[in-house]
Image (cartoon, rainbow, N blue to C red):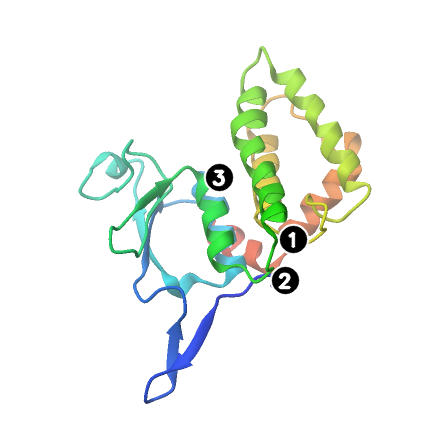
Amino acid sequence: MIGFQSVSLVGGANGTRRDLVCCNLISYYRASTNRSRSAQVDWLIAELNIEDEINYVKLDMGQEEHKDPAKNAHPFSKVPCMKLDDKNETVIFESANILGYLAKRFDGLDLSEEQRREMESWIIWLNASFGPAVVNEKTRERGYESLDVIENVLKTRDYMCTFNKFTAADVAVTYLLSTLGRLLPGFPNFEESHPALAAYIAKNQAREAYQKSLVAQA
């Protein structure tokens, strides 16, 4: 694990571990399989090494458990979402939002506000602009042109952000591009068309947290 850590203190009469940021667990509502956007959240949780902070609520999508408000806190009956451990039990949803929240709360990079905004810009762009463009046949080719921008970025540094450290942005980019490559007909073969991007994805998929959360539990 590089660049991430869970914040904790040792306290109490017995010297037991006490979390600095929370005492209760975050309830995480996810699909029971890795074939959903929940997978990238699982990966980031593993990178942050915060599995012990999470109460996993796995929903059987085939049985439509996600549509039961008694089982799923998402206001639109989708996954993923999280019910936070604050006094109001705040519910957050949309995978891009969840990634940004977890990174801000738990990572150990000590990013500046400007760096965090850069990281979140990549996550939001992927989910709000690139993803919708390439799944629509009318805009797909224009969406594919964006891959040239990413290729040029990765020719000059190892990771997406200019401060060149692995972040939630890299989780989002790697997950979405590799997923779309499996699902969309005619999606570019990166090894032929975008070699820097292909090497970047392979490197990130070799990370211990990826193997633990997405491969071992597939």
Amino acid on which disc 2 is placed = Ile
Residue 99 appears in the figure: yes
Mark 2 crowd level (few <14, some 14–19, many ≥20, 10 Å Cα): few
Q: Position of residue 173 (x, y in %)?
A: 61, 40
Quarter of image, res 76: top left
Q: Which residue is mark 1?
A: 166
Give the mark nearest the N terminus, 1 or 3: 3
Q: Secondary structure at mark 3?
A: helix
Q: Are marks 1 and 3 in contact (CB under 8 Å)?
A: no
Mark 1 crowd level (few <14, some 14–19, many ≥20, 10 Å Cα): many
Seen in the picture, residue 43 relative to 188 is either above or below; the reply is below
Amino acid on which disc 3 is placed = Ala
Give the mark nearest the N terminus, 2 or 1: 2
Instruction: Identify the mark at residue 2; answer none if there is no mark.
Output: 2
In the foreground, 41 or 58: 41
Residue drawn at point x = 60 percent, y = 14 percent: 139
What quarter of the picture does the N terminus occupy?
Answer: bottom right
Q: Which residue is mark 3?
A: 96
Q: Are marks 2 and 1 in contact (CB under 8 Å)?
A: yes
In the foreground, 70 or 161: 161
